[in-house]
Amino acid sequence: MMTIIGVDIGGSHISVAQINWNSGSIQLSNFSEADVDTSGSVDEIIDAWSDVIKKVANGKQAIQLGIAMPGPFDYQNGVSLIQEQGKLKSLYQLSVKDLLADSLSIGPEFILFMNDAEAFLRGESMVGAGRKHSNLLGLTLGTGLGSAIQVEEVLKDAKLWTAPFRDGIAEDYLGTAWFIGEAKKQYELEIEGVKDLLAPEVDSEISRSIFQKFGNTLGEFLFPYVSRLQTESVIVGGKISNASKFFLPFAQTYLERMGLELTCKKSELGENASLIGSVQPFFKNLT
């Protein structure tokens, strides 16, 4: 019996857990996570990742790994194409699949890579906020903008972060940098991230105004996609989603004003969504 392990790799972090499929429900066990210095050498990064995976595997050798990974990345072949982001540079154009397989002493065929936003939506679609719908759009909002779409049986990375929007691209308006810039430009307020807007010393009217503007912007951005794809629900994850109750209602109201009936929801699974979604193809093979 294969032990199925979900892995979520970020720019400075790794989360790993055993994922167990039990008569239609999913359980996570042996969860472990670590901070990783991804500016290090190939060996340093691979060793750090392997250490956490081995800890979770708990001595088992018959393992299958689903790995949620940020792009750009050749997911089919497990080759990193990340070059400009300042992280994971040493892995550029190397087969992460082969390097990890060697380090873990398993065959590369037991490792599957998936875009992190796609893994997020797969998890939510299976057992989270999207389980009752077949047409979904998932967004992970944080430093960057991750996106995935599901139309019936087809679920894939939507790559909307570079979509033209206003006088730039979507990521200019739908990430942490926009909040920092908006607070400074409109209110001379210095913040490091979205959670700073919720600090007691920040005027709640200012916070409300910024969140309202963000929610309306999100609705405006989503409109052409959700109308064309007949999306039933938009599911939002990532760090910014922790403040979703302050902006999602504005996004939903914007879309309703445009004549669309759909729900905008916060992720139910949080950081577990990508861990679960990354191993979904293995469960497909079991059922």
Image (cartoon, grey):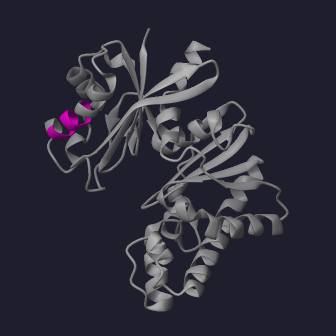
- x, y (%) of residue 33? 33, 41
Q: Nearer the viewer, residue 278 or 160?
A: 278
Asked where in the image residue 17 lies, by quadrant, the reply is top left
**Which quadrant: the N terminus?**
top left
Residue 227 in magenta? no
Q: Position of residue 73 (x, y in %)?
A: 38, 40
Residue 130: x and y in percent read 68, 42
Quadrant where the C terminus is found in the figure: top right
Q: Is residue 14 rendered to the left or right of residue 160? A: left
Q: Is residue 86 above or below residue 274?
A: below
Q: Main secondary structure of the magenta part?
A: helix
Residue 59: give x, y in percent of width and height.
27, 17
- Most extreme residue toward the right is 259
Q: Residue at x 57, y 46 (%)?
A: 158
Residue 231 visible to an observer of this rendering: no
Q: Residue at x 43, y 86 (%)?
A: 184
> Quick one: 101 or 169, which is closer to the camera?
101
How many numbered dots are placed on residues in this image?
0
Query: Is there any visible trace of residue 180 in the rendered image?
Result: yes
Q: Residue at x 32, y 19 (%)?
A: 108
Q: Position of 166 compared to 262: left or right?
A: left
For residue 30, above or below residue 120: above
Tell me where the magenta segment starts and ends, as one range: 44-50
> Would you say 41 lies left or right of 71 here?
left
Q: Is residue 35 above or below residue 278?
A: below
Residue at position x 39%, y 45% in the image: 72
